[in-house]
Amino acid sequence: MKNYNWVSIGCGVIANELARAMAAEGRTLYGIANRTYDKAAAFAETYRVGKVYRTIDEVFSDPAVDILYISTPHNTHAPLLEKALKSGKHVLCEKSITLNSEELEAAAALAEERGLVLAEAMTLYHMPLYKKLRGLVESGALGPLGMLQLNFGSYKEYDMANRFFNPKLAGGALLDIGVYALSFARWFLSGAPCEVLSQMAPAPSGVDERAGILLRGPAGELATVALSLHTKQPKRGMAAFDRAYLEVYEYPRAQEAVITWTEDGRREVIREGDTGDALRYEIRDMERAVAGEGNEMCLGYSRDVMAVMTRLRRDWGLVYPEEMPTAR
Ligand SMILES: NC(=O)c1ccc[n+]([C@@H]2O[C@H](COP(=O)([O-])OP(=O)(O)OC[C@H]3O[C@@H](n4cnc5c(N)ncnc54)[C@H](OP(=O)(O)O)[C@@H]3O)[C@@H](O)[C@H]2O)c1
């Protein structure tokens, strides 16, 4: 398979992780583009990236670029996706891929029209553990799914300078961490959730700080999700089937699950993959999709998750500045 030319737009925390993952693959990013040029230049020096773009817009007209990795805040994704896809680039975009379904459906339509791969960088979909668990579920050994329960809570200071609580940077628990819990739920549910209920408690800035979410899957299975951004919780995912339940800690990049069998209480540990290689799995799946050698990018799941998040924020009356009628 060809070695594709990747460029990251953004050079923050997660872009550094991508550059390290590339290095672990024995590769380097082809280029780096950032709002602040000096930071891009420093990033290029650290990771031996050959090309530093003066402006983000220059990337779109460079014919050498195959795959764009968008690693800027959520509220900047939709306009960057539009430019990237219109210029014929494949895109791996950080979570949450857009603010709402309208933006995501517009990007998905562009990608489809142009035969491009568009995907959300949701590590969970690429971890070998989940692929193994999927096989186990499909084998029927666990029986039908009844319940899912997901926790995710971080403790972030009420600091408006960072992106977590700032509405102008599309802050809030749902788009920042809820997307992981809902992606876990979608991985196991029999289809897109057909009913969505919730309670939300806002942060002082007005964005969602805590939420309790209840989903119903097409086969009647239920999922409960607890999110918080100023209260620590374990990152714990649980899927309960007729014959056993699965528990996964640190679920966004998990390498281990524990199965407890209902019949005799026996516990079985399943290990697959390596948490430290999460972005390497993502890079490999993306390149296989671009090469037409399979599609494990799960954009359909991202669309279902985005539909749930769009519905929840509508129920909560939580609108970001980009979504105000005056911004259109
Ligand atoms: N998948 C994961 O495990 C994971 C983990 C962390 C984050 N993320 C996601 O990745 C994205 C970035 O997070 P991060 O933690 O890397 O953020 P970060 O460290 O704050 O970096 C943000 C980057 O975006 C750029 N930026 C900020 N505002 C911008 C704007 N208005 N227009 C263009 N560029 C802008 C910044 O440029 P300057 O240098 O000019 O400030 C910087 O390069 C978010 O969507 C986040 O949810 C994913």
Image (spheres, grey):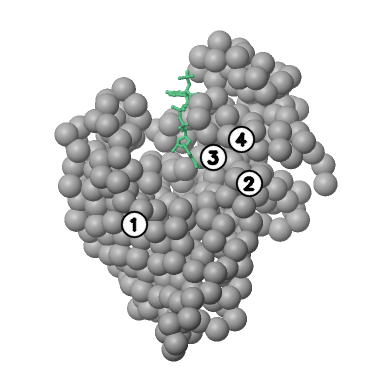
Q: Which residue is mark 1?
A: 151
The CA span between labels 3 and 2 is 18 Å
Q: Secondary structure at mark 2?
A: helix
Residue 221 % position (x, y): 36, 76
Q: Which residue is mark 2?
A: 277
Q: Which residue is mark 4?
A: 18
Residue 267 is left or right of residue 326, and the answer is right
Work out which residue is located at the far right of the displayed protein and give it: 1
The CA span between labels 2 and 1 is 23 Å
Residue situated in front as seen by the camera: 204 or 2: 204
Q: Which residue is mark 3?
A: 93
* Badge 3 or badge 1: first in the primary sequence: 3
What type is the residue that disc 2 sits on?
A: Asp
What type is the residue that disc 4 sits on?
A: Leu
Tell me which residue sits at (39%, 53%) in the image. Answer: 235
Q: Secondary structure at mark 1?
A: strand
Tell me which residue sits at (50%, 18%) in the image. Answer: 35
Q: Nearer the viewer, mark 4 or mark 2?
A: 2
Is the residue marked 1 within 8 Å of ligand 1, measured from its CB?
no
What type is the residue that disc 3 sits on?
A: Cys
Q: Is residue 159 visible?
A: yes
* Badge 4 or badge 2: first in the primary sequence: 4
Q: Nearer the viewer, mark 4 or mark 3?
A: 4
